[in-house]
Amino acid sequence: FALNGSSDAQVIAAVAYATGDGLPANPDRARQFLKRALQQKDSRAWYIYSQWLRQGAGGFEEDRVEAEYALKRAARRGSPQALYELAVRELNFDGGDNSKAVEMLERAAQRHDLPAKYLLAQLKAGGVGTPEDLVGAAKLFAELKRWNYRESSLRYDAVMEDLETSQNTEAMIEVDLYAKSGYEDNVEVIEVSGARITTEEYVSELVDVLSGVNLYDGDSTGTNIRGQVCGQGVSKCNVIYTAGDRGNAGTTALGAILSKFSPSLN
């Protein structure tokens, strides 16, 4: 897939060659595959590129200036890791404007980045760097609880206690319903159900299908398609014989065959 142009596969191959995880370590191959993904403007590739340039890894020489450029480019392309890293740098806890940092955290959280959600929830819960938003914080902690992320469960309980103390019953109900619902917008819920089916039921349905397509003449297991004869031309079909001698045996009626499975169908 990597050789055929999949940027996902190219990123995976690059990391595998760089770390020796699953493949023999090969910095040259790692660099080649990452460059291919970069050409396709893959946000993950740009973030990895920024890290490798900063560390002098993955077959690249250390270049902190280029690393910073790559990090910002990754963020512009929506890399949640890059957005989170830049947001942490941008945060000002001395009363400065944190709107840009919060906006980047929001974008990273929308892409389901757990560290971004956790930090954003803490900021909202404490009103640090952003206006206090207990409901928003509780919803984020509720999502993080699902992944058992750090102390999200304890922090969720603490925020709910604050809401209870403020006697904001309506907000508590809203959060509780949110926590119990499928709050992930992009998660598809698939319900699977099964049923046991007997041989008789299966064969009965088979008879209905054969009758419906009108290709079975009721006499033999040969073909009933006009112009086609079993064993001749392009037609291929199986014939069940009543005797072991193929040369002089006649074909068996389908009803007789089915009766071996379900006598009631004969």
Image: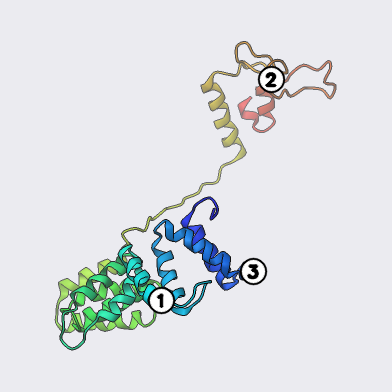
**Rendered location of residue 240, percent (x, y):** 74, 24
Residue 262 is situated, as x and y percent measured from the top left of the image, at 64, 32
Amino acid under label 1?
Answer: Asn
| Quadrant in the picture for residue 94 | bottom left
Q: Left or right: 37 with respect to 153?
A: right
Tell me which residue sits at (48%, 58%) in the image: 36
Residue 112 in view, yes or no: no
Residue ID for mark 3: 24
**Could you tell which of marks 2 and 1 lies nearer the N-terminus?**
1
Residue position marked by numbered label 1 in the rendering: 148
Q: Is residue 161 visible?
A: yes
Q: Which residue is mark 2?
A: 253
Q: 12 and 192: which one is in front?
A: 12
Q: Residue at x 68, y 23 (%)?
A: 237
Q: Distance between the Cα atoms at labels 2 and 3? A: 63 Å
Near-viewer residue (135 or 212): 135
Sequence-wise, the earlier of marks 2 and 3 is: 3
Assign a secondary structure to mark 2.
loop
Q: CA distance from mark 2 to mark 1?
A: 63 Å
Q: Nearer the viewer, mark 1 or mark 3?
A: 3
Q: Count of labels shown? A: 3
Using the image, determine if residue 41 lies above or below residue 163. above
Task: Report the quarter where the C terminus lies.
Answer: top right
Are the residues flagged by discs 2 and 1 in contact, CB closer than 8 Å? no
Query: Is residue 202 left or right of 188 when viewed as pictured?
Result: right
Taking the spot 46% from the left edge, 78% from the top edge, the residue there is: 62
Looking at the rendered structure, the kind of residue marked 3 is Pro
